Amino acid sequence: MKSPQLLLSEEACRDLSQCPVLNLSLIVPVYNEEDTVDIFVDRVSLMFADASDLQLELIFVNDGSCDDTLTRLLSRQRQDGRIRIVDLARHFGKESALSAGLDAATGRVLVPIDVDLQDPPELIFEMITHWRQGFDVVIARRSHRGSDSWTKRQSATWFYRIHNWIAEPKLPENAGDFRLMDRMVVDALGDLPESRRFMKGLFAWVGFRTTFIDYVRPPRISGTSKFNGWRLWNLALEGLTSFSTAPLRIWTYLGGVVAVASLLYGAFIAMQVLVHGVDLPGYASVFVAVTFLGGLQLIGIGIVGEYLGRAYLESKRRPCYLVRRIYDSGG
Ligand code: UDP
Ligand code: MG
């Protein structure tokens, strides 16, 4: 717990007159991005060239790329001392790469940003203005998803709809990882013990004073998206199972409803036989009921399995990433 004096001086740091230079860390996860690294560094360097009130730190997290991404990064680092490279031991996925970058960053404010320029770096100035006004988190929200494919738009809409219906806390719609966060928000994230990290959910869980700025997401500058349908589906499952137990609990209620309905139906059949002496109908209804209930049970077991699998992996307490080496400029 920080002392009130320290918190006060941290607040004063938002005031331009009291704290003229702001330490800003950009966290850039990269996975097979040899074509985009240079374009990104050029654009960011140009943008911050005149920003004398900002001390920039560019943290690239190499997420086990198998192309020339690391070589490109190292060559850029020789020309630009603000670049630090966290080279992960293998491919861990974007969520882990982001965690690695946030852990390594030293800035007072931190911004995770994609290397493909789909998160326009120009917005960072506006984010800083909001931060100076007292917000701890400034989220860039896509005003529309025109640059995404139809399938990606639909799946995103349905994911947010279902997630926000059954899970707490709610995720802000159309908000990705591109956001400015105060150091205390990132420290709070670092204190969360789980090793399977669904970052959008964790960002929402820690909360803090939050505001939004809207932007139109441009298409990728080069290369292709690293998230295909299967990976998006798994990310959605991770999000739902990390922040909601509703899919587990629903089976209790569904089981109750089916049990009561079958009791009533059983009573109805008994009445028919006793009162009217009607013959029992054929096997078709029994067949349908057995297969339907069998299917339901398998789905139920599958969902329990999803949670059990995650609890099993979490119980191993493995770190969510391993660093092979950190390349500091000159080091
Ligand atoms: N990325 C990563 N690891 C992965 C997938 C992606 O570090 O397993 C990085 C990627 O290099 C890029 C950012 O995460 O900087 C966003 O990836 P992408 O553009 O493929 O995602 P999309 O914009 O399609 O959601
Ligand atoms: Mg992208």
Image: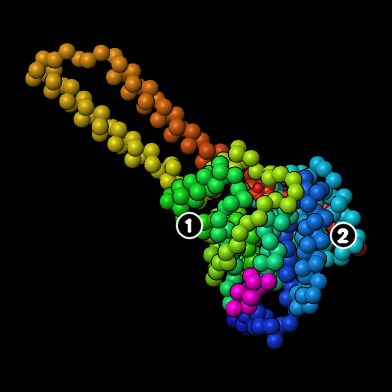
Give how far across and how far down residue 45 sits, in percent: 81, 66
Marks 1 and 2 sit apart, C-alpha to C-alpha, by 39 Å
Side of 185 where 78 appears, left or right: right
Local packing at callout 1 (Cα closer than 10 Å; few below 14, some 14-19, many 20+) is some
Q: Residue at x 82, y 55 (%)?
A: 38
**Residue 77's mark?**
2
Q: Is residue 258 above or below residue 280?
A: below
Side of 146 where 71 appears, left or right: right
What span is in magenta?
A: 125-133
Q: Secondary structure at mark 1?
A: loop
The residue under label 1 is 170
Q: Is residue 124 above or below residue 70?
A: below
Side of 281 where 161 appears, left or right: right
**Which is nearer the eye, 10 or 233?**
233
Q: Residue at x 30, y 33 (%)?
A: 258
- Mark 2 CB within 8 Å of ligand 1: no
Whether residue 240 is visible to the viewer of this picture, yes or no, is no
Q: Residue furthest bottom?
A: 17
Q: Main secondary structure of the magenta part?
A: helix
Specify whether residue 285 is painted magenta.
no
Give how far across and how far down residue 134 sits, in percent: 58, 77
Q: Residue at x 30, y 19 (%)?
A: 286
Q: Residue furthest left?
A: 275
Give how far across and how far down residue 318 sits, in percent: 67, 46
First in sequence, mark 1 or 2: give its number: 2
**Residue 214's mark?**
none
Q: Secondary structure at mark 2?
A: helix
